[in-house]
Image (spheres, rainbow, N blue to C red):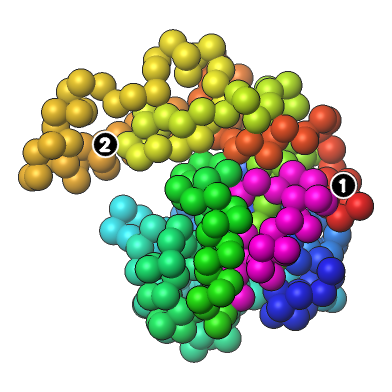
Amino acid sequence: MQTKLTQLLQIKYPIIQAPMFLVSNVAMVTEAMNAGIAGCIPALNYRTLEELRAALKELKDNKPEGGSFGFNLIVNKSNIKYKGQLEVICEEGCDFIITSLGSPEETIRQAHAAGIKVFCDVVDLKFAKKVEGLGADAAIAVNNEAGGHRGNLTPEELTNQLSKELKIPVISAGGVGQRTDIDKMLSYGAEGVSVGSPFIASVEAGVTEEYKQACVDYGAEDIIMTERISGTPCTVINTPYVKKIGTKQTWLESVLNKNRKLKKWVKMIRFSIGMKATEKAAKKATYKTVWVAGPSIEHTKAILPVKDIVAKLIS
């Protein structure tokens, strides 16, 4: 399974353990590295820059020979911590950064100066061409089977298109829950895959046992889109609570979103409310169960250590 991604990150298998808000942590990424794949954590999983710096240092101390780890950065204005997070990551060092939701230009410039590779989330060819022109080291093709905020194109459509048009490696994100899925993505032209949802039900994941067990008990047909978390469509498990509150924005939000002056503030408020609800559901047992996941939980049959999940993916 040697590809351009394994060469780029010096890893054994062409898999990145995807960064997941609230879920990913040092323990998960450490075990991912020990199992021969790369791991990534959202910088927003750390409330302070001091906590982020401590995580970076711990990962460097735990990093095995041939291991590779990175951090995910939200690079638009909604992330007020962005500049500080980028500065800390560049100071401490890691193998790669994954950028999301905005222009990666500044991240690429600073990261490359620090010897850090930059991979950029993209959902279409237009943006993929832009990040390639800015010097991105790889494009992460977020397709319509990804968990959380996803793209509109199928894995085959998006990966085929990008792999033919780009000179940089394409990493397929979404729809991978078993080895045959990885083989399919590579056949479409991908140089590797980004896998998130199967790792939610890991022993090391920093969420409740209820959240993990939900990924075992529910399947692909239970994944739906909702606008009630961040204001933009996001995939969640269709729990009784989600059914109760509905998946569409409220009539008031709908009206306010049509007002140009208020639209930005409404989205920010909805994002803040949604993230707090998601955090409560992820960190403690509650009837307000808003659990983010993708359809690849279809292949999750038990809560397992990260090393066993990796073994299942490559077997």
Is 183 contained in the magenta span? yes
Q: How many marks?
A: 2
User: SS for tag 1?
Assistant: helix
Where is 17 relative to 262, above or below?
A: below
Q: Is residue 74 visible?
A: yes
Q: Residues within 10 Å of mark 2 (few under 14, many from 20)?
A: few
Q: Nearer the viewer, residue 231 or 274?
A: 231
* Residue identifier under label 2: 269
Q: Quadrant of residue 199?
A: top right
Residue sitting farthest toward the bottom: 113
The residue at 83%/30% (across/down) is 302
Q: On residue 250, which mark appears? A: none
Q: Is residue 72 visible?
A: no
> How many angstroms separate mark 2 from mark 1 (CA)?
40 Å
Q: Nearer the viewer, residue 79 or 168?
A: 168
Residue 36 spot, x, y in % from top left:
84, 64
Residue 125 spot, x, y in % from top left:
43, 67
Amino acid bearing label 1 = Lys
The residue at 53%/12% (across/down) is 240
The residue at 75%/50% (across/down) is 181
Amino acid bearing label 2 = Ile
* Residue identifier under label 1: 312
Where is 290 relative to 43, above or below?
A: above
Q: Which residues are magenta?
A: 169-191
Q: Nearer the viewer, residue 266 or 82?
A: 266
Q: Residues within 10 Å of mark 1 (few under 14, many from 20)?
A: few
Is 42 contained in the magenta span? no
Where is 93 relative to 123, above or below?
A: below
Tell me if 287 is positioned left or right of 258 in this view: right
Residue 62 spot, x, y in % from top left:
78, 65
| Mark 2 vs 1: CB contact within 8 A | no
